[in-house]
Amino acid sequence: MIIDGKVLSSEIRSDLKKEIESIKNKYNETPHLTVVLIGNDPASESYVKAKERACKQVGIKSTLITLPSTISLEELLKVIDELNKEKLVHGILVQLPLPSHISQDTVIDFMSQIKDVDGLHPHNISRLHTLRYSVLPCTPKGIITMLKSKDIQIEGKHAVVVGRSNLVGKPIAQLLLKENASVSITHRYTEDLASITKQADILVCAVGKAKFIAKDMVKKGAVCIDVGLSRVEGKLYGDFDFDNLLDHVSYISKAPGGVGPMTITSLLENTVECFLNQKKDIKL
Ligand code: NAP
C-alpha cells in the first residue's frame, strides 16, 4: 500500500480552507504567514514558491520578504524584530539553509516563539520534549498525520529512525515516543545499521541518499516513511529502494510526493494554529 502525500494533503487542505473561511468570518482577519528568503538558492526559491501557492489555495495571506545573501546578521534580526512585533503577522518562517555567515541558531532563537510556524524555536522544542503543548515541527507532524490517516498502529511498535537532524530525525523520534512507540535512533556512526533497521515495525529514513535502504534492510510487512530526497542525473529519488520494496512492506510513502506535500500542509495547519493561539492569547 502506497501512502500518497499529495492525495492526503489535498483532503486536509480542502477541510482547512473551510476552517479558514469560518475563522475569517469570526475574527474579521486573515491568518498571515511571512516567509523570509535570503539569497537566491534555486531549491529554496522553489520551496518558497510551493509554500506561497499552498497558502493561496487555502486562503492564508502570505508575504515573501527576499533579502540579499550579503545581508548581515544584525540587519536580518532587525527585519525579524519588526515581524515579531507586527500584530497582523501571525506566522514567521525563515527559509533554511541560511548563508554560512549567518548563525541559524541565533536567527531561530530570536524569532517570536508564538509565531514559530516551523516549530523549531528551542522553547517549542523543549516543550515537545517535556510533553507539553507546542506547535510541532512540520515534517514530523506530517509523518504522524500520514501514519494516522492509514490507522497504522504506533503504540507498542518498534520505530527506527535513520538520521538525527534537529529538523527531522530528533523531532520525529520524539513524536513517535509520544505516541508510545519504542524508538531507536540511528546515524552515520551506527554499527551494522541493517541489523537495527530490520527490527523496525515502522522505519523512517531521513538521510538524503538515493535508494539507501535496500530490501534486505527491511522486515517483511514493515511501514516505511521516506523523508529523504536527492537528485541523481536530474531525477529525484527517496531514501528507500521503492520499486523493490513495494511487494515486501505493508506501507511505503511516495518520494517525491509523500512527506514533502505533507510538510507544507503541516505548515498551513501551524499558521492557523499560531493565529488562533494569538487570538485566544494562549501562552507558550
Ligand atoms: P541532515 O541534517 O543532513 O541529516 C542527515 C542525517 O543522516 C544525519 O543525522 C546523518 O548522521 C544521517 N546519515 C548520513 N549518512 C548516514 C549513514 N550512512 N547511515 C546512517 N545515517 C546517516 O538532513 P535533514 O535535514 O535531516 O534531511 C534529510 C533528508 O530529508 C534530505 O534529503 C532532505 O532533503 C530531506 N528532507 C525532506 C523534507 C520534506 O519535506 N520532504 C523535509 C526535510 C528534509 P550524522 O548526524 O551522524 O551525520
Image (cartoon, rainbow, N blue to C red):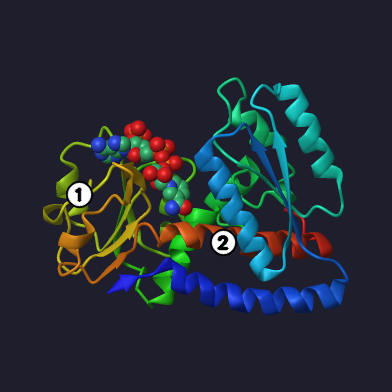
- Residue in the image at 27% along x and 74% along y: 1
SS under mark 2: helix
x and y percent of residue 225 in the render? 33, 59
Q: Is mark 1 within 8 Å of ligand 1?
A: no
Specify whether residue 134 is in view: no
Which residue is under mark 1? 196
SS under mark 1: helix
- Residue in the image at 47% along x and 68% along y: 145
Which residue is under mark 2? 266
> Left or right: 140 with respect to 268?
left
- Residue in the image at 57% along x and 55% along y: 50
Classify residue 29 by image quadrant.
bottom right
Quarter, ligand 1: top left
| Circle 1 or circle 2, nearest the eye | 2
x and y percent of residue 71 in the render? 70, 24
x and y percent of residue 150 in the render? 38, 76
Could you say which is closer to the camera, residue 210 or residue 182?
210
| Amino acid on which disc 2 is placed | Ser
x and y percent of residue 253 in the render? 33, 64
| Amino acid on which disc 1 is placed | Ile
